[in-house]
Amino acid sequence: MTLQKYYFLLLFFLGISLCGTQLYAKTSLKSAIAVSNTANIGTIKAMLQSEDLEKLYSRSYYSLLDRMQGDGFLPESLTGAYPGMYPRTTGAYVLLLIETGRLKEAELTIKCVLDALSQNNMERVCHVINKDNSRYTTNTDDAFQIDGQAHVILAWARLAIKRGHTQFEDNTWAQVSALMARTCDRTFFDCGWGEPKLVMNTAFEHSRDSRYWDCWDLLTQSFVGAAMSDMIKIARRRSETDLANNWKQKISLLAGGVRDKLVVNRDGKPTYIEMLVPKNGNGGIPYLGVSWVNLSPIAAGWEGVDHQVMRNTVAYMENHFLQTTNGIRWMPTDMYSDGSFTNSVIGKGIGWELEFARSENNYTRMKEILQLIRSANINSHIYMEFAWLDGTGYAFQTRLSTGDIPKMNNLPWRSRDAGNGEQTSWFCWAMARLRKSVGLSPEPARIKESEIHRTE
């Protein structure tokens, strides 16, 4: 054998050996990840099946189903904190019912909202619906929150996609498609030259500072984008080609508006902002705090930009604002650009965080959120609207700094409005999806009837 051939064979066998080592390493890594995932899934499943979380989920879920009246009317509050039915909650509630297979109930509650609008000759969705004997009224609070309208449209569209063509779709298509058309026409969709290409919300209901904001907010864009995306599918199915093409053009403009106006760099990476606030013209200025609003694309299921922006946003929120007291990790309801934050957690924000952690297979964060849910609801048998660490000088929504946290380590959690329709629906939606992902039934077993409506 020549020296040249010897070197060739040596290199050949070394190459085979190296490839085999790399293949073994990759296989071993995959096996290790699989074992780790199996263990983590088992841990999450065990937490979900624990007595306290099982009872909290069951009581919360059936509090929603049992309070819904025969016509689909869903009272918002069990405590009386919020009178009437809130159409915005219909969006969360129907998405939950789709997860648990309660499609008849989903149709019924959507029909209630649409009937209320028809009875009152309304071409838009009002903030609150009430009942006077057998007739619906809208004069309790007829504020126009366009994001709430988008919630109703999305609920209708998701149900139509889930079931396929139905008589209910035929009966209500004209009304719902008209709502969609008004939502994205130039009345509110500022998509002309020099405008931000975003949908204006003239009464955005926020937990932060002022109750209502006049702004272009991320939540509105997320739910309008989701609703329009799904309505395009139904329009095409119904051979409404011109309408579908019109909405397709508008959703492209909307995605561009989100990209150009609602994304800023933080920590060197693109992240979502909450809202663009009008000032001295159409351009607006970005509001640079963060809150549950930044998580709204998770709930809506529509993102105008690459999903990495959502990942960056959550990472930014966790790196800068995630707090720890008494071993519990919690994300404040509202956080400010100066580093301060509020002394509260909001129900839907927790649900949206949980769904994001599930979708990213972030088992560590899932465990932390489930532990927070246990602690924040420890004094309530049904899921809360808000919770906060209660102590002298630390009331609900008190503005905090990181210097306050060590002083709050042993404070108890206090909550309000147990069973709040919107917050409870989003919590149950996230729990249903998480339970399904670990092999549990999305719909919980019912506990004793006598315990369901306890809200102390």
Image (spheres, rainbow, N blue to C red):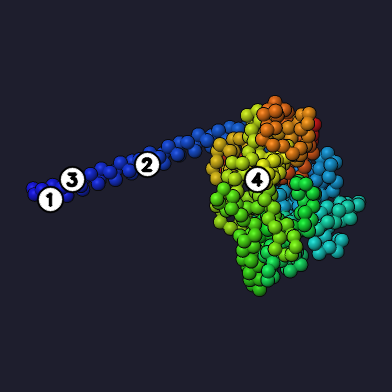
Left or right: residue 84 compared with residue 9: right
Where, by quadrant of the figure, is residue 430 drawn?
top right
What residue is rendered at 89% in x and 55% in y?
139
Mark whose residue sits in front, 3 or 4: 3
Tell me residue 114's x, y (percent): 79, 59
Which residue type carries mark 4? Trp
Q: Earlier in the sequence, mark 3 or mark 4?
A: 3
* Label placed on residue 10: 3
Left or right: residue 193 compared with residue 68: left
Q: Earlier in the sequence, mark 1 or mark 2?
A: 1
Tell me residue 145's x, y (percent): 78, 56
Q: Helix, strand or loop at disc 4?
A: helix
Mark whose residue sits in front, 4 or 1: 1
Q: Nearer the viewer, residue 134 or 326?
A: 326
Residue for badge 1: 4
Q: Residues within 10 Å of mark 4 (few under 14, many from 20)?
A: many
Q: Are marks 2 and 3 in contact (CB under 8 Å)?
A: no
Residue for badge 4: 352
Where, by quadrant of the figure, is residue 58 drawn?
top right
Residue for badge 2: 27
Q: Earlier in the sequence, mark 2 or mark 3?
A: 3
